Amino acid sequence: MSYQLTLEPLGATIEVEDGQTLLDAALRQGIYIPHACGHGLCGTCKVQVCEGEVDHGAANPFALMDMERDDGKTLACCATLQSDAVIEADIEDEPDAQVIPVRDFGATVARIERLTPTIKALHLRLDTPMRYQAGQYVQLQIPGLGQSRAFSIANAPGADGCAQEIELNVRLVPGGAGTTWLHESLREGDALRLAGPYGRFFVRHSARQPLVFMAGGSGLSSPRAMIQELLARGGSEPITLIYGQRSRAELYYDEEFRALARRHPHFTYVPALSGTDADDAGDEGWSGARGFVHEAARQHFDGNFAGSKAYLCGPPPMVEACIATLMQGRLFERDIYTEKFLSAADAQGARSPLFKRV
C-alpha cells in the first residue's frame, strides 16, 4: 500500500510507501527537507500537515509538543502517512545544491587502513557508482544491530560527480556498539549495505569568497573531500584549513595536507594540538599551533573573519565554540555552514543557540 504526498510550496507530489517516513520518501525523490538528528529529538524537520492523517511515530514530546500536534504539526523523520496528505515544509532555495535522490547501495570492503590509534579508514567499493557532492554523507547499516550510522564521505567524487569507491573515516567511540563492531569485527572482503547521499554540507562555489574550514576529531572527512574537490577544480580563492586534535598521534592526513599546502599557494594548513601534557601531545618538538580549533583560528586570522565562508565539522562543543568565535570576528549565520547529521546522543543539542536555524 502507498499514499500520495504533496509538498508545498513546491507543489510536488510523491509516492510514500506504507511505514515509510515522510523524510525518507522526500529524500529518495531528491527533495530536501531540513533535518538533523533523524531520531525525532531535535525538531529540525518539523512540518505542517495541511490535509490528511499522519502517525507521529517516535517523536519526542519535547521536540513535538502536544499543542503542536493539535495544531497539525509533525516531525518528518518519524511521521508516516495514514492517508493521502498535503504538508508544508520550510524548503530553502539553494542554488549550489544538486538534485540527487537518495539510493540504496551494496558495498564490498576493499581495504581497511588504520589512520590513528582510534580512527580507521574504510574503503568501500560500491555495486554501482554513487553521484554525490563533496561534503555529503551516507547511512551505513551495521550488521547484527538493526541500525545504521552516519559517516561523511572522505574522498571527493570524480570529474563526472560520481565515485565507484568511497572512503569512510570511523572513530572508535567508547561504548559505541556500531563503531566497536566496525573496528573489531569488520574484515576486508565483507559485504555491507548503505544509503545516500545525504546532507547539505557542500561548497557554495557560486559565492567566490575565501573559504575557512574548521575541523576536529574525525570531522576532517567532509573538509578533506571538499578541499580535494576545490583544488581539483582550480580557482584562486584562498582556502584555509584549521584542524585540531588532542595529540599528534591522532592528527591524521597531516602529511597529505602539508604536501597540498606546498603545491597550492592559495591553500593554507593550520594543524593545532590541544593536549597540555607533552607526553599526551605525543611530540615534545611540536612547533605548530597549540590550543583548540577556535583559538587557533582566532590567532591565525587575528580575530577577523569578515568576507569569508566558513565550513565547520566536528564534535558539537567544538562547532559551538567556532560559531561564537566566527561571529565575534564579524562573520554571521548566512556565511557559516555546519555538518547537519547528529547521533541520538547529540540530538538534544542540535540547534545552536546562536543560530535562528540549525
Image (cartoon, rainbow, N blue to C red):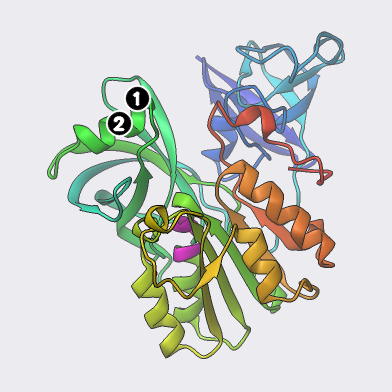
Task: Name which residue lies at 41% across and 81% down.
Answer: 260
Question: Residue 231 appears at what percent x and percent y?
Answer: 48, 80
Instruction: Determine whether, in the image, residue 322 is placed left or right of residue 214.
Output: right
| Distance (Cα) linking label 2 and label 1 | 5 Å
Instruction: Determine whether, in the image, residue 38 is placed left or right of residue 68.
Output: left
Task: Name which residue lies at 67% across and 39% down.
Answer: 33
Task: Name which residue lies at 39% across and 67% down.
Answer: 284
Q: Which residue is mark 2?
A: 180
Per the image, is 9 magenta? no
Q: Is residue 331 above or below residue 265?
A: above
User: Answer yes or no: do the residues labelled 2 and 1 have beta carbons within 8 Å?
Assistant: yes
Disc number for residue 177: 1
Is residue 159 in view?
no
Q: Is residue 107 above or below residue 228?
A: above
Magenta residues (range)? 220-224
Per the image, is 222 magenta? yes
Q: Is residue 9 above or below residue 287?
A: above
Q: Residues within 10 Å of mark 2 (few under 14, many from 20)?
A: some
Report the quarter where the C terminus lies: top right
Q: Is residue 261 above or below residue 188?
A: below
Q: Quarter-wise, where is residue 322 in the image?
A: bottom right
Magenta: main secondary structure: helix
Helix, strand or loop at mark 2:
helix
From the viewer's side, name the closer residue of 310 and 226. Answer: 310
The amino acid beneath tag 2 is: Thr
Instruction: Determine whether, in the image, residue 284 is placed left or right of residue 328.
Output: left
Disc number for residue 22: none
Instruction: Determine whether, in the image, residue 113 is placed left or right of residue 22.
Output: left
Task: Name which residue lies at 46% across and 54% down.
Answer: 277
